[in-house]
Amino acid sequence: MNTAPATLVPSLELPRLRVISPPREDRPPRPEAQGLVLTEELAAEIARESERLESASPQDILRWVTNRFAPRFTMATAFGPEGMVLIHMLAEIAPQTPIFNLDTGYQFKETLELREEVKRRYGISVEMKRAETSVEEYERQNGGPVYRTNPDQCCFDRKVKVLQQAVVGMHAWASAIRRDQSPDRAAAPIVGWDKKFNVVKVSPLANWTKQKVWAFITQHNIPYNPLHDQGYTSIGCWPCTRAVLLGEDERAGRWSGFGKTECGLHSK
């Protein structure tokens, strides 16, 4: 009896399906959006490390903070002499560190040109963080330049609020302040908790002097703002900055006539 050969049916392997769960409102936020919580353990660590690093070099302080918090460590700079010193150090220690500038829209052209020099010299692109409104929109909304009538409000809107957004997702940031610059900075720790921005704040140059900063700049041929050679000892926005007179405090040229020496980033 002839038996017809069986028809072979090719085996079809169905693709595996990946089950995607629907989004849930009770899920934790994405890791990159999570902030840092000041626990008792973290507070103790901050106090301990600040005391330990009090006599350390700025380079050692930067090594500690980058090892401890990177990639959630950042630095803000206004391209002042202290900031340029830290940029020079970070270029050697941790060049991948994100560095940003709070661009108010009122900066001197010399300051903006220095940003380009940083890129040429160190290969570091400093990110410009800006307010939601342009200078023109901001002044139109407020009936004119706010810095003339309420510089505290102008600084808050175009610097403090911008920094609040710039450090979202970060756990630590570095500032270039020195203790001898102003009464508000006199008690600045090397490592502290910045309750205004809910991050760890590290000030590697807190116990340096102006003379030490400039000696380091000269020794390493670090670029700096040419306005410093014209009597501008502290440089911020052009409408609120002037050269200082002989015998004046180094921050006397900031907000002259308003009895104001801080923009709000470093005040309590």
Image: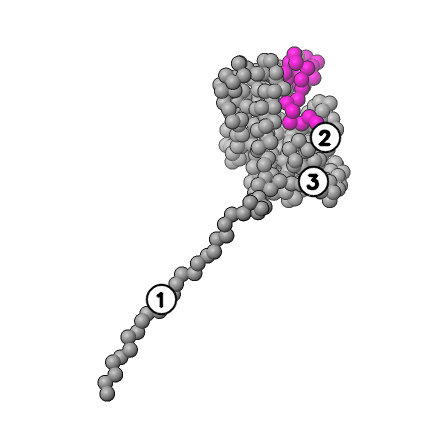
Q: Secondary structure at mark 1?
A: loop
- In 3D space, how far apart are the residues under numbered discs 2 and 3 (Cα atoms)? 18 Å
What type of secondary structure mainly makes up the magenta span? loop
State the residue in front, 129 or 68: 129
Splitting the image into 4 quarters, where does residue 150 fall? top right
Q: Within 10 angstroms of label 2, few (less than 14), some, or many (20 or more) residues?
A: many
Sequence-first disc among 2 and 1: 1
Q: How many marks?
A: 3
Magenta range: 246-268
Amino acid tagged 2: Ala
Tell me, yes or no, if residue 230 can be seen here.
no
Front label number (1 vs 3)? 1
Tell me, yes or no, if residue 123 can be seen here.
yes
Q: Within 10 angstroms of label 3, few (less than 14), some, or many (20 or more) residues?
A: some
| Residue at mark 1 | 12
Give x and y (percent) for residue 35: 62, 40
Sequence-first disc among 1 and 3: 1
Splitting the image into 4 quarters, where does residue 93 fall? top right
Q: Secondary structure at mark 2?
A: loop
Splitting the image into 4 quarters, where does residue 46 fall? top right
Q: Secondary structure at mark 3?
A: loop
Sequence-first disc among 2 and 3: 3
Quadrant location, the C terminus: top right
| Residue at mark 3 | 38
Give x and y (percent) for residue 68: 65, 44
Amino acid tagged 3: Leu
Residue 254 part of the magenta-drawn span: yes
